[in-house]
Image: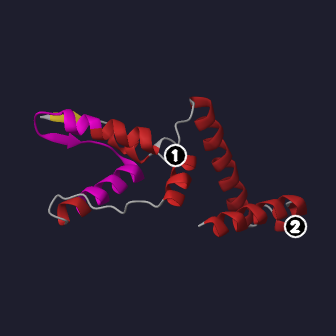
Amino acid sequence: MVYICHSEYASSPYIAVRARNVLFTAITRSRAWVRLCGIGDGMSELIDELQRVKTNSYRLAFNVPTELELQKIRKIHRDKSDSEIAKQRDAVRNLNQLVLMAESGDLPIEAIPDDLKKRLESLLEASNDSE
């Protein structure tokens, strides 16, 4: 029996490709039964994915991305240095904190500078247009 600990690592949003490759390699190199062990939301996502494979008679089914989708995937999921990952994680955490404060009323929307709101709107619109 092979136990793969910290399997939720494969759902890490900042290193998804590398993390999934590590998990896939660990599973396929085993010459015995494999047990995936982990905790949290990442593990729940992995369990859901494994359940879909089981429901599909243990056959993997996925859509082959178009060239445009591949470009987007490569941009989002490229290998990043540890400092890039930390920087992105901090930025998302800070943005999440800003949104939570605005939602709770701790930070009035009017306190957010207009130029920052316009830049965020522009980024979100551009992101929606590219999808």
Quarter of the image holding residue 56? bottom left
Residue lying farthest top?
82
Please name the amino acid that badge 1 sits on.
His
Q: Nearer the viewer, mark 2 or mark 1?
A: 1
> Residue tagged by mark 1?
77
Q: Residue at 89%, 63% (x, y): give it.
A: 114
Is the residue 108 above or below the residue 35 in the image? below
Is the residue 97 above or below the residue 121 in the image? above
Q: Nearer the viewer, residue 18 or 92?
A: 18
User: Between disc 2 and disc 1, whose residue precedes?
Assistant: 1
Q: Nearer the viewer, residue 71 or 8?
A: 71
Q: Position of residue 113 (x, y in %)?
A: 89, 59
Question: Quadrant location of the C terminus?
Answer: bottom right
Q: Position of residue 103 (x, y in %)?
A: 70, 67
Quarter of the image holding residue 112? bottom right
Q: Is residue 90 left or right of residue 32?
A: right
**Can the viewer see residue 55?**
yes
Helix, strand or loop at disc 1? Answer: loop
Quarter of the image holding residue 55? bottom left
> Residue tagged by mark 2?
110
Q: Position of residue 2 (x, y in %)?
A: 17, 34
Is residue 29 covered in magenta?
A: yes
What is the magenta range?
Answer: 25-51
Q: Residue at 67%, 60% (x, y): give it.
A: 100
Q: Residues within 10 Å of mark 2 (few under 14, many from 20)?
A: few
Question: Quadrant location of the N terminus?
Answer: top left
